[in-house]
Amino acid sequence: MKLDQKNLEIYCLSSITKSVKCMENLTAKNITESHFDYQSEGDLVSYSKAIFTFVMEYWNVSKSLFTDLVLESMMNTKKVPSVHRIKIISLWSEIEDCEFDENNFHEIASQLKQKQALKILSKTIEDSASKLKSDGLKDAISVIENNLQSINNELLDYVNEKQSFDVKQSGSFFENEYNKRLNSPELFRGINCGISNIDDKTFGWMPGQIVVFLAPSSGGKSVMMLNAALHANKNCGKKVLYMSFEMNAWLCMLRHISLSFEIPYDQIKGTNLSQDELKTIVNGLKEQSEGAYFEYDVNMEDPTPDYIDGKIRELIATKGKPDLLVVDYIGNMTVRNASNGSKDWENQSKAVQGLFLLAKRYNIPIITAQQINRETIRDSRKSKDANKFMSYDQAAASGGQNLMHLCTYAIAMEPNRDLGYCVLHPVKMRDAWFHPFPVRLNSIYNKVEEIDEEEQQQIMGLHGVATGNKTVKETSDKTPVIKDKPNAYNSEGMFDDKQSEEEEFVKFNMDEDEELDVSDWMLS
């Protein structure tokens, strides 16, 4: 199906004003107003571009589809002159009458991008020829090189914004970008994790970032990631894809329901729900069916970036591109067609590179986790004996170092099982920083809860650590108030009062398997 520029633009506008899936696909492919430039004979402006601008402006603010009423309201607000209003309404009628098929949208978008690539190529040839005559070969080649990346971006399925600029010539660029953020700050915040000490410093997880939580085995990695993902879904309205390479679908469902409805995990797992509680869960899940999806994908046979890529493409074609990807966890990942004799940590390192490419290709943040290595855990014993918190650096993660190089934020989790809290430490913070601080670990619902500032100071004061700008004395005669004291985690990453610390052990990514004594790895 080959269409001319006018019909391509009409078909595209009809699709994105009638289908959320098409709108998600359009933003994933980075189609912008530059792709809309059709002008009827005698017109001095492109009315299709004007409508596209209206549609995207409304979508960015409301995440809702464009309608007749919205068009009328926007034209009134912007005081569109009657001569232009008539042309816009006429074109809008054609858009509404256009019969579209969601299955055709990929082809429509591809043709729009190919035509844009041809326009850039044509202008490149024209400009380079002019430069060759006026300034010589070197400047002509420079014109070609500057436009090649734009052409390549148009030929890709998914691209990110242009990242190259000359600071000395970027005054207008800075002013425009600053004013965008000043006038519409909500459009430039990332996805909050629900922990204010982190959200206030990072402004949320931003598209293209990798965020990694570091903890010992059964140290709460999955709990932390689930809490962050559920907050993004329920409180921020974000679509979440949760890849579980560790737990089966039933355990994922139990954990999710316990946290989402605040029903004790043991009660659900032990099938001890009353009929009223069961009805509450079932009805609650049905009510959530209309909101942003939270999709679990459990795969222990092919935990690879290639598999994740296929799942994202499937969602883009059916439910829309996910806003957040959670990978639980990187330690279980590998790559397809691994080299003979390659070690697990080498394959994990390549898997990290694959995740990094996915974050950039689809322009979404990725949350994952990794175990703390053997040396860091053994060093923590000295800190524990001295009543101090562990000091973490970028060598704390087990396996290869690619994860530390490619992630934007790495946060270590130091749980205190006896007192029911976990201290979060900044390990790598590319553009932000926070002082170590504690959060509550609620064992009943596997819930991470914030602690008020006074109690934070009490907890940190026990270890002679300052919180924020406050100075805490080396010793304190106060003890923190402990609520809902949690017990040890079980092997599923959950709290389990039936499992004692002495029964726990962990294996790390080593050349030789080695079981460590519990005193070697318990952080507190």
Image (cartoon, rainbow, N blue to C red):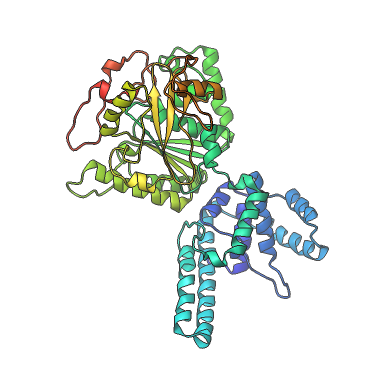
In this orientation, which residue lies closer to the viewer: 193 or 182?
Answer: 182
> How many dots with numbers?
0
Residue at the bottom extreme of this rendering: 133
Q: Residue at x 49, y 33 (%)?
A: 228
Q: Residue at x 36, y 44 (%)?
A: 404
Q: Quadrant of the C terminus?
A: top left
Q: Is residue 52 above or below residue 492?
A: below
Residue at the right extreme of this rendering: 82
Q: Is residue 508 left or right of residue 54?
A: left
Q: Is residue 270 left or right of residue 454?
A: left
Q: Residue at x 59, y 47 (%)?
A: 188
Q: On the image, which quarter does residue 308 sit in?
A: top left
Return the x and y of residue 312 as percentages of the image width and height: 44, 46
Q: Is residue 58 left or right of residue 270?
A: right
Q: Is residue 140 left or right of residue 371?
A: right
Q: Is residue 438 above or below residue 292?
A: above
Work out whether residue 435 can be spotted: yes
Return the x and y of residue 383 as percentages of the image width and height: 33, 26
Work out whether residue 220 can be spotted: no
Return the x and y of residue 99 as percentages of the image width and height: 62, 56
Return the x and y of residue 190 as percentages of the image width and height: 54, 43
In this orientation, which residue lies closer to the viewer: 303 or 169?
Answer: 169
Q: On the image, which quarter does residue 403 sit in?
A: top left
